[in-house]
Image (cartoon, rainbow, N blue to C red):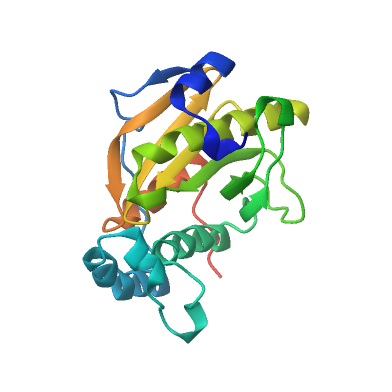
Amino acid sequence: MAYSDFTIPQLKQLFGLHLIEDRPLFTTLPEYPLPAHLADTLKRYLPLALNMNTEKARSELLIAPLLTEFKLSELLIAPLLTEFKLLHHDAISLFSGVEFNVDDSKGLRGRCDYLICHNPEQLAITAPVCVAVEAKNDNITGGIAQCLAEMVAAAMFNQQQQIEVKTIYGIVTTGMSWRFLALEGQTAIIDITEYSIQTPQIIFGLLRQMFALSPPAQP
């Protein structure tokens, strides 16, 4: 069993999770201005993403010689998360496509799309406080169980490392739509709101709020 194999009922039974699905996760929606080059990248690819209405069509589309290995959804996810890491390089680390095997006996194993840790070290995973899952078949709801399983694993990993992290955050995204989750103990809150990449300054602001980050130092 791996993260992607879990269902919501299994997570409730195995880990005693209690889900809250009927309220916003955030009381305020902070906005943070995007760096000019990131805004330009999104401006270039958003019209194409809006007009490609299936994941299969997007994944088959080759974009520019230097980016031919990326699916279109990854062209929207990776730049935003990478820029977030670069702006806060002294505070967080970003891992993509890493094996995160925490407890084989409980099925908490497999590859994570993205892990974000509140620690600048890039050589090893330390105290993950956010996991991000790329939704398959443009199905945000279908990615929630996998994301929750990875969040449970992150909480267990922190306990094993004797690192106290009160809240583990999660993101399920198609690239176009972003939905946020939070896990505190056995209570999981699934934000009732989906945020659009067409308002990336809100997504950026929420990421910064999750990590309680101060504005990056000016060069």
Residue 126 appears at what percent x and percent y?
72, 42
Residue at position x 72%, y 46% from top? 125
Is residue 162 something that shows in the picture? no
Locate residue 77 relative to residue 3 in the image: left or right. left
Nearest the camera: 18 or 158? 18
Nearest the camera: 42 or 147? 147
Is residue 123 something that shows in the picture? yes
Instruction: State the image quarter where residue 24 is shown.
Output: top left
Residue 174 appears at what percent x and percent y?
37, 52
Residue at position x 36%, y 47% from top? 178
Instruction: State the image quarter where residue 150 is shown.
Output: top right
Residue 76 appears at what percent x and percent y?
40, 63
Q: How many marks?
A: 0
Quadrant into which the C terminus falls: bottom right
Q: In the image, is residue 174 above or below residue 148?
A: below
Instruction: State the image quarter where residue 15 is shown.
Output: top right
Locate residue 85 relative to residue 136 in the image: left or right. right
Nearest the camera: 24 or 1? 1
Q: In the image, is residue 45 above or below residue 23?
A: below
Quadrant into which the N terminus falls: top right
Residue 168 appears at what percent x and percent y?
55, 32
Q: In the image, is residue 157 above or below residue 112?
A: above
